Amino acid sequence: MSSEQTLQTHGSPPGGPYRQGQPARSGEHILETHGLTKDFRGFVAVKAVNLGIRRHSIHALIGPNGAGKTTCFNLLTKFLSPSAGTIVYKGIDITHHKPAQVTRLGLVRSFQISAVFPHLTVLENVRIALQRQRGRSFDFWRAVEVLDQYRPRALELLEAVGLAEFAEIRAVELSYGRKRALEIATTLALDPETMLLDEPTSGMGHEDVGRIAALIKKIAANRTIIMVEHNLSVVADLCDTITVLARGEILAEGDYASVSRNPEVVQAYMGTAHV
């Protein structure tokens, strides 16, 4: 990350104003929001948020409790509908799309889409995700030989996330960190162009945090990653761009070095010396 990156201003949407039915102006942004707002019966959880997520970057949303991170994430992944504003993905207005529609466009949320079946093996979990990606939900009832066509790709994905040696182990027997790695594998089976990770290291010990952080860096080589994450050392090590939210609005944006020196950010984090 370049420590010389300056904080962006947020008076206008990234890439300029967007009009319904037109492609986004900025080719470097794979995902943009313009005036994104969510009002829960008078309580404004997200207020006029303008985001520009660069292609093949790792972009984090951070902020103190109640900042609007989760609501913003739910809006991006279409688990909530905005009260106002637009969401543009690859030049397409997805503001009113359903979650399944944005998944087909390559925008996939891990740890929501990719449920782990605890009493199936690790390999079977990934195979099911591959069947789903191909739209063949009734493959469950077909011959074993038919299902075996997914095995080579499933093993490739397990190798990619460091779980090849656990292929025949039931998912329930995995450690918490390795279950998270399995969830990432099942998400990768859907062949996403953009992955949204909701607190991927939450509740992990130090060893698992390091393993998952390394995995995220690996899979980001040819994908865009958007993440909500509370572990700020992970954010500092991984993320190209960090958006700090407070009270539903963007407080600052830039690389870790720049946002961690921002006095408003420091104050939002209750006077801590570093973000």
Image: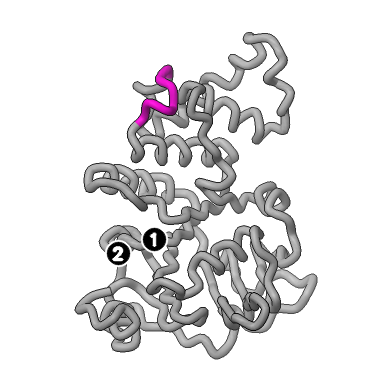
Q: Position of residue 149 (x, y in %)?
A: 61, 17
Name the element at disc 1: loop
33 inside magenta stretch = no
Residue at position x 50%, y 82% from top? 249
**Residue 252 coordinates in the image, percent (x, y):** 41, 82
Which is nearer the eye, 98 or 26?
98
Q: Where residue 176 sits in the image (x, y, percent)?
A: 35, 38
**Tag of residue 194:** none
Answer whether labels 2 and 1 touch (C-beta < 8 Å): yes
**Residue on which the image places disc 1:** 229
Near-viewer residue (86 or 246): 246
**What residue is shown at x 51% (from left), y 34% (from top)?**
116
Q: Quadrant of residue 242?
A: bottom left
* Pointer 1 local density, CA inside 10 Å: few below 14, some 14–19, many at least 20: many
Quadrant of the rendering where the C terminus is positioned: bottom left
Per the rendered image, the range of residues in magenta is 168-174
Q: Is residue 50 above or below residue 31?
A: below
* Farthest residue, direction right: 21
Q: Amino acid at mark 1?
A: Glu
| Disc 2 from disc 1: Cα separation | 7 Å
Counting other residues with Cα less than 10 Å from the Cα at mark 2, is it few (<14), some (14-19), or many (20 or more)? Answer: some
Does the image show residue 67? yes
Please state the horizontal and vertical placement of residue 128, each as a whole percent of the image. Answer: 60, 27
Disc assigned to residue 232: 2
Which quadrant holds residue 244?
Answer: bottom left
